[in-house]
Image (cartoon, rainbow, N blue to C red):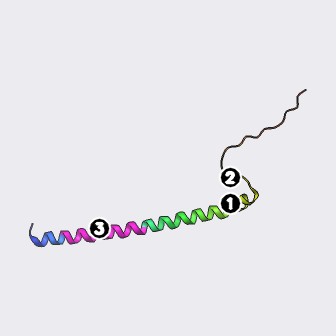
Amino acid sequence: MNLAQRLLGAFLGVLFLIAVLIFASLALGVLLAAGLAVWGWLWWRTRALRREGRVIEGEFREETRRLRL
């Protein structure tokens, strides 16, 4: 390999690295925005349940009283 090929390879490598970093930062931004939008939608849809004091998550057991004879 001569010097021109090495310089061209290094230049293209740097360009590829910059393109990958730009794509990764854009993808991260899009994913963060989508996650924030989903969280905000869920928060908005469950606001009435929070006002009433209902528990959305967890387990519960419904116990009924039995009449003994």
Q: Residue furthest top?
A: 69
Residue at the image position 34 percent from the left and 68 percent from the top: 21
Distance between mark 3 and mark 2 Cα atoms: 46 Å
User: Mark 2: which amino acid?
Assistant: Ile
User: Mark 3: which amino acid?
Assistant: Leu
Highlighted range, magenta: 9-26
Please give the residue where the numbered disc 3 appears in the rendered image: 17
Mark 2 vs 1: CB contact within 8 A: yes
Q: Secondary structure at mark 3?
A: helix
Mark 3 vs 2: CB contact within 8 A: no
Residue 26 in the figure: left or right of residue 60: left
Q: Is residue 19 magenta?
A: yes
Q: Is residue 12 magenta?
A: yes
Q: Residue furthest right?
A: 69
Residue at the image position 84 percent from the left and 36 percent from the top: 65
Please give the residue where the numbered disc 2 appears in the rendered image: 56
Q: Say which of 27 and 57 sits in front.
A: 57
Q: Secondary structure at mark 2?
A: loop
Query: Callout 1: 10 Å neighbours few (<14), some, many (20+)?
Result: few
Query: Callout 2: 10 Å neighbours few (<14), some, many (20+)?
Result: few
The prevailing secondary structure element of the residues shown in magenta is: helix
Residue 37 in the figure: left or right of residue 56: left
Distance between mark 2 and mark 1 Cα atoms: 9 Å
Q: Secondary structure at mark 1?
A: loop
Q: Position of residue 37 (x, y in %)?
A: 57, 66
Q: Mark number for residue 46? A: 1
Residue at the image position 42 percent from the left and 69 percent from the top: 26
Q: Mark number for residue 59? A: none
The quadrant of the image that shows the C terminus is: top right
Q: Earlier in the sequence, mark 3 or mark 2?
A: 3
Q: Say which of 5 and 55 sits in front.
A: 55
